[in-house]
Amino acid sequence: SDECGAGVFTASHFDRHYCGKCCLTYGFNKPEVT
């Protein structure tokens, strides 16, 4: 991730990336679908 730097685990979900180090979730530029 950009916050933690290269080499940090990020989980690629269907609509976002989740940083396993800082627990920050990156959402893609899409509207929320419930």
Image (cartoon, rainbow, N blue to C red):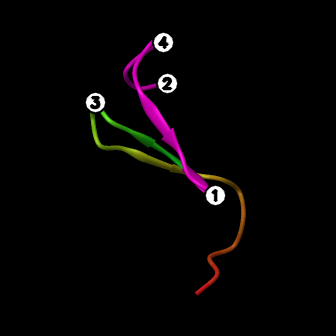
Percent across and percent down for residue 33 are 64, 81
Between circles 1 and 2, the one closer to the viewer is: 1
| Badge 4 amino acid | Ala
> For the stretch drawn in magenta, what is the main secondary structure?
loop
9 on left or right of 32: left
Q: Mark 3 points at which residue?
A: 21
Q: Mark 4 points at which residue?
A: 6
17 on left or right of 19: right
Residue depicted at 32% across the width and 35% down the height: 20
Percent across and percent down for residue 9 are 41, 26
Label 2, label 3: how many angstroms apart (C-alpha)? 12 Å
Give the residues in magenta.
1-16
Between circles 2 and 4, the one closer to the viewer is: 4
SS for tag 1?
loop
Percent across and percent down for residue 6 are 48, 12
Label 4, label 1: how many angstroms apart (C-alpha)? 21 Å
